[in-house]
Amino acid sequence: MEVKEMEVKEMEVKKKKGAVILPGSYDPVTLGHVEIIKKAAREYEEVYVVAFVNPEKKYVFSTMERVKMLMLATDDIDNVLVSYSDGYVIDYMRDHGIEKIMKGYRNDADLEYEIKQAEWNLYHGGYETELVKCDPEMALISSTRAREIIARGEPLEKILPKKVIEFLNKS
């Protein structure tokens, strides 16, 4: 029996990219947010999910409550780091060696707003933004709607992660 030399092809392994930040208010974190966070976690080695504090905004949940909810919502994703900041996104990125921004959008109005933010971050910091369209099933979910539903005492299962709901029920 003759032995033929087999041709061996190397499989191309898709290497994960470096670090990305998903900045937001997360007041509260929704299933839509978690969808985008999971996408980032599949593509990047480190995913910084940062609740930013904007002094011009009024929040329903404190900074620490928002951070706690983010931690609960992402505790099963190994490469996610949750934090908060009261500074600018580009300063946080520079301080933590983060290369890119990822933002989700639901519709044309969101996209228009996110493009303006992306242009600002590119112009002022040199950081590119990856804009990701959410799953159509998530398009109606927003933190604003979540707060309205929470205030009315209606079921939250279709808009908030289970552990976040449990946290809110204990509060």
Image (cartoon, rainbow, N blue to C red):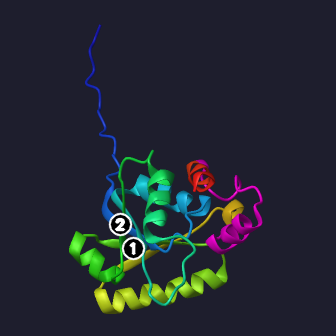
Residue nearer the viewer, 161 or 15: 161
Magenta segment, which residues?
A: 142-162
From what the image shows, is residue 112 above or below residue 13? below
- Residue 148: say if magenta: yes
Q: Indicate the secondary structure of the residue bearing disc 2.
A: strand
- Residue in the picture at 48% in, 71% down: 62
Report crowding for label 1: few under 14, some 14 to 19, many 20 or more residues within 10 A (C-alpha): many
**The residue under label 2 is which amino acid type?**
Val
CB under 8 Å between callouts 1 and 2?
yes
Is residue 107 depicted above or below 124 in this figure?
Answer: above
* Residue 49, picture quadrant: bottom left
Q: Nearer the viewer, residue 154 or 9?
A: 154
Q: Is residue 126 left or right of residue 162?
A: left
Q: Is residue 89 magenta?
A: no
Secondary structure of the residue carrying tag 1 is strand
Q: Label 2 belongs to which residue?
A: 20
Q: Position of residue 101 (x, y in %)?
A: 39, 73
Direction top: furthest residue: 1
Label ID, residue 101: 1
- The part of the image, by quadrant, that contains residue 100 is bottom left
Left or right side of 39 for 17: left
Q: Residue at x 72, y 68 (%)?
A: 151
Is residue 114 at all visible to an observer of this figure? yes
